[in-house]
Image (cartoon, helix red, strand yellow):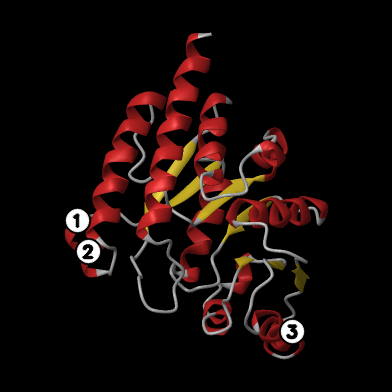
Amino acid sequence: MPAYNAEATLQKTVADIPFEYVDEIILVDDASRDKTVEQAENLKNNFLKSKKIPLTIEKMSRNTGYGGNQKRCYDLALAHSADIVVMLHPDYQYDPKLIKHFVEFIRDGYFDVMLGSRIRTRREALEGGMPAYKYYANRLLTFVENIASGQSLSEWHTGMRAYSREVLESLSYEKFSDDFVFDTQVLFSIVERGYKIGDIPVPVRYFKEASSINFKRSVKYGLQTLLEIFKFLINKLL
């Protein structure tokens, strides 16, 4: 769980996790300005203790960014002998109850990576609160990324993902960006290595407490994504 200012949503996110599929929860707090860590400690010592689910909490001394936070999450998960690692945002934007499906598809050998797609239909995405400009940018970038990579993924830009241990160990993710484009770099690297990627639909949840980058950051992210597509195509030609 890469956490940043998730005090208001952390408890209900954790409460919806299907604990029969989880051996440990790891939360890395990216120097939040609220009481995310205190909320996590409370869950660790009360709710999760009663469920017999260990919670590892680490607070970063400075804000490292979305990609930087994920790097530390994966480092800890691999160090703690995880076989399957699920990234779940603690802002409740993605439905934790779907974790079981992510785990089962990887555990049973169907896929090496699982993605949760918020784009089942345009109507559902927009009614779920996704801003129109984000929806159309998502569709355009995903279309180009699929053409470039030979994949047929319904969304490249989801924040709910699961990886097998083998996949994470094969990636040099520490060299990737600390910014939001980290996710795109990870997927292109996975495609280059020939791993199987699956996806399933997940509900769209945009609300006040859910994290979401603004228009300016979205434009920057879009340009960075186009650059990653170009770099991927150049590498294929070399």
User: Does 221 sit left or right of 189 as displayed?
Assistant: left
Look at the numbered discs 2 and 3 and tell me whether their residues touch, using CB distance below 8 Å.
Answer: no
Does residue 156 appear in this view? no
Answer with mark 2 or mark 3, whichever residue precedes in sequence. Answer: 3
Q: Name the residue under label 1.
A: 122
Q: Mark 2 points at which residue?
A: 126
Q: How far apart are marks 1 and 2 (CA)?
A: 6 Å
Q: Does 81 appear above or below 3? A: above
Q: How far apart are marks 3 and 1 (CA)?
A: 39 Å
Look at the numbered discs 1 and 2 and tell me whether their residues touch, using CB distance below 8 Å.
Answer: yes
Q: Distance between the residues labelled 2 and 3?
A: 35 Å
Q: Which element is circle 1 on?
A: helix
Q: Which element is circle 3 on?
A: helix
Q: Which amino acid does label 3 sit on?
A: Glu
In the picture, which quadrant includes the N terminus? bottom right
Instruction: Where is residue 110? Give x, y as percent.
Output: 51, 40
Instruction: Where is residue 203? Give x, y as percent.
Output: 34, 65
Instruction: Where is residue 146? Give x, y as percent.
Output: 35, 31
Q: What residue type is labelled 1?
A: Arg
User: Does 9 sit left or right of 139 as displayed?
Assistant: right
Dot label at residue 41 = 3
Q: Does 141 appear above or below 212? A: above
Dot label at residue 105 = none
- The foreground one among 145 and 20 is 145
Answer with mark 3 or mark 1, whichever residue precedes in sequence. Answer: 3
Q: Residue sitting at 71 percent across and 86 percent down?
A: 38
Count the labels in the image.
Answer: 3
User: Does 237 sit left or right of 25 as displayed?
Assistant: left
